[in-house]
Image (cartoon, rainbow, N blue to C red):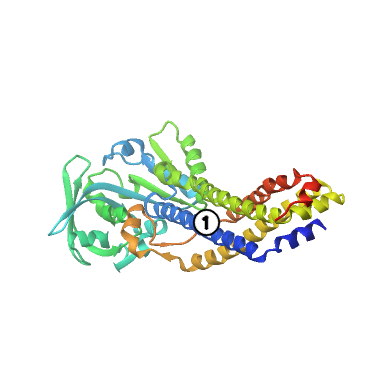
Amino acid sequence: MLIKLAWRNLWRNRLRTSIMLGAMIFGLVGVMLMVGFMQGMIHSMVNNAIAFQTSHVQLHHKAYVADPTMSDVLPDYQEVEAWLESDPRVLAWTPRLLANGMIASARSARGVRINGVDAHREAEVTPVHGRFVEGTWLPETGRNPILISQLLASRLKLRLGSKVVLTFSDVSGEVSGAAFRVAGLFTTPSSGFDESQVFVRRSDLFALTGLAGEEGQVAHEIAILLNDSEESRTFAIEHRERQEGTSLLIRDWQTIQPLLASLLSQTGVSMLVMVGIFIVAMMFGIINIMLMSVFERTREFGVLMAVGMQKHRIFSLIVLGTTFLGGLGVGLGLSVSALVSAYLANHGLPLGALAEGLGAFGADTTIYPHVTLADYRLVTFSVITAAAIAAIYPARLVLKQRPVDAMAEKH
């Protein structure tokens, strides 16, 4: 009976209830889209950083990270290769020779990191091979091919087939270098990556470094992709413990990019803040509506108390009414939000005008909202609970009055 009465009372003033529902729906859609796009942008930055820069885990010589020196190559390369091949969590891995040097064209020069890579293995780890504007991925034949970004090509006034000169310090500290020809132009979401990274064949770079040993057994860095990104920290810690006492340094992407890891961990807090602001505003609206509704029905409540209805049942009647309002509002609001999010998850929100700014942070220029089922559950519970709490003050005002005073109330 109470449920039926509470539902009918909710619709006594259809206009007032409809206005409140409209405000809740509009507010919820706005909050969920804002949360979705904020989380989508952060996930885009993290995913792009993992894909193009850090992978899930990286291996280095400990001294190389502190002060990159050509001679500080990975220790026990064959042993490392063996446990990488035997670990079922590893999806793919690639060795790299690295050199910090200069790339020079006939018109300009820039400082870059030269990545000497195994073309086949690198293509399994880094999605650069699928981001070409012109040209192709590193060919197996031909003399000294090089891949540079379209952005770097524009800075140096280069085009496909242009000749450039790479120079760097070799293992003995002497200046080494050679001429390379542009075989492909790529583009990535990160302008910082595009301006600072070039790719050459590992064998071509090895021939210029003066490093001892076999070319296939020497690397400064190994980048590792795992089957499950959530395993990156566990994987790094486990193998770090096994390699304790050696000069091998094993780092997961959170350690390499602490700022991004911090941003990702703070998304939940940011969502709670935005949802909290909406809920506080919604509670004031519900309190206002319930106060008006209660004052209009003071005599009715007085009659109910006079004929013997217990106060806790009247209290329950008022709380049920606001709970229905909150439940209906959150149901409609989240339904509309889910529909809009589903559409934008397929089409995205293009932010082409902000491309340069987003590129500096490594985010895509088309943002896709990222809202989880847990987010919807949290908002549903919070709104319904807040609506029930908002009914307490108006209900207490009614229950404080004596039945005779309530029945004598005039409006």
Q: Residue at x 47, y 68 (%)?
A: 347
Quickly name the residue at label 1: 31
Q: How many marks?
A: 1
Name the foreground residue: 123 vs 269: 269
**Residue 295 spot, x, y in % from top left:** 69, 53
- Is residue 190 visible to us here? no
Which image quarter holds the N terminus?
A: bottom right
Name the foreground residue: 342 vs 250: 342
Q: Residue at x 81, y 47 (%)?
A: 404
Residue 301 vertical placement versus 335 (above, below): above
Circle 1 Cα neighbour tier, 10 Å, few/some/many (<14 / 14–19 / ≥20): some
Callout 1: SS: helix
Task: Tell me if 3 is positioned left or right of 382 in this view.
Answer: right
Task: Tell me if 396 is positioned left or right of 49 in this view.
Answer: right
Residue 107 in which image quadrant: bottom left
**Residue 200 spot, x, y in % from top left:** 27, 56
Task: Tell me if 205 is positioned left or right of 335 in this view.
Answer: left
Residue 364 in which image quadrant: bottom left
Given the current orientation, which residue lies at the most extreme right position? 308
Given the current orientation, which residue lies at the most extreme left position? 106
Q: Residue at x 51, y 53 (%)?
A: 227
